[in-house]
Image: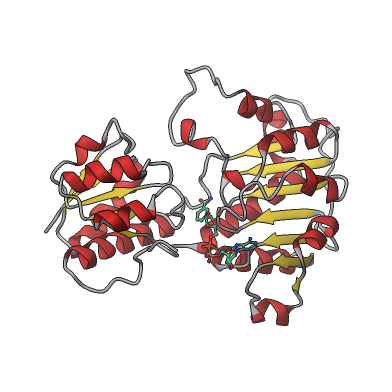
Amino acid sequence: MADVRLFSAKPYDRHGFDTANADHGHQLTYLETRLGPDTVDLAAGAPAVCVFVNDDVSAPVLESLAANGTRCVALRCAGFNNVDLDAADRLGIAVVRVPAYSPNAVAEHTLALILTLNRRIHRAYNRVRDGNFALDGLVGFDLAGKTAGVVGTGKIGTIVARLLWHLRCRVLAVDVQQDPHLVELGVEYVDPDRLMAESDIISLNCPLTPETHHMIDAAAIDRMRDGVMIVNTGRGALIDTEAIIDGLKRGKIGSVALDVYEEEGRLFFEDRSHEIIDDDVFARLLTFHNVLITAHQAFLTREALDAIAGTTLGNISAVLGGDDCDNVVRPS
Ligand code: NAI
């Protein structure tokens, strides 16, 4: 049994972790606060901490963790761009993650965003509730026959590509590794420039790396079709948000759906309805009727939460027990 401190813990995390812990018997402490330089002392004495996408697992935080006896940082997510892996390695802290929990959850949310945005369901919902039954401004387009470009055909992107193909889109894809099943289906792997130039819908499903940072910038937008729909359920910094705003203002971009935002760490996962939003870029995004934003909820299904909890506790048990663990993340 180990003392495990879970940072950024929300009420919806507890059910899955309490249930999965029946198999592990760890002592779980749920902390609402984020992990960072100011809160790292809350982990003192715990051999394992569990963190989420916006916790700060930088070198100074890792140094404090190591000094206070932490040997394992368990990410309850797939991405690990918020962890300094070199520092963790140097300090002897194992970093583990959940490589796959429910790629369906994220892919289905991606599709939900595309369908909602295209058919203006978010606007129609409010209008009808307000007794406004006018249809002006709600014109969408048939997905059938359109070209959809999927950037990154890993676990999530593959499902996105399949769903779009089943909606009778022509599907283009970019990835360093081709999925033979998608090729068999009729998905065409192309170079990034061609995907940008030919797609009516572009879905970003690749990880954030130095190479993919701001892959959607002003130059990429200029290459796109007029009226393109851009959907990002990957990571916020895949997109240069200011360039997107400029493209929306010019009418070059037809619509944008985001589940992630490059400065989301200062906003998402908290109720800020009583606060003033001081992020002017985000505030500008909110003014566009053709921008649909969800606050990093693509993963949020019951199945995904249960799978995340089970894998995370399994990772912690393996690392602290000295067993092999396939989900250790090492510096590249
Ligand atoms: P994965 O590792 O299975 O697939 C990622 C794919 O992207 C791989 O096939 C890889 O070769 C490809 N890729 C890497 N660099 C690329 C580049 N420069 N251009 C095109 N493709 C490239 O990962 P998975 O599970 O499909 O997740 C993808 C991303 O989705 C994660 O890295 C994470 O950032 C994001 N995500 C978002 C969630 C949300 O709730 N919004 C939840 C889970 C993941």
Q: Quick one: which residue is furthest to the front in this view? A: 90
Residue 259 in view in this figure: no
Where is residue 93 drawn, in percent x and y?
26, 56
* Residue 121 visible in the current orientation: yes
Q: Which quarter shows the N terminus?
A: bottom left
* x and y, in percent, of residue 256 in the image: 72, 42
Q: Is residue 264 above or below residue 147?
A: above
In front: 320, or 11? 320
Is 81 placed above or below 272 here? Answer: below
Q: Would residue 245 appear left or right of 113 to someone viewing this image?
A: right
Q: Residue at x 54, y 35 (%)?
A: 263
The extreme right residue here reads 226
Q: Residue at x 33, y 51 (%)?
A: 87
Residue 213: give x, y in percent of width and height: 61, 49
Dividing the picture into quarters, in which one does residue 45 lie? top left
- Which quadrant holds the C terminus? bottom left
Q: Find ligand 1 in the image and state its quadrant.
A: bottom right
Residue 24 spot, x, y in % from top left: 18, 63
Residue drawn at 54 percent across, 21 percent down? 277
Residue depicted at 65% across the width and 44% down the height: 239
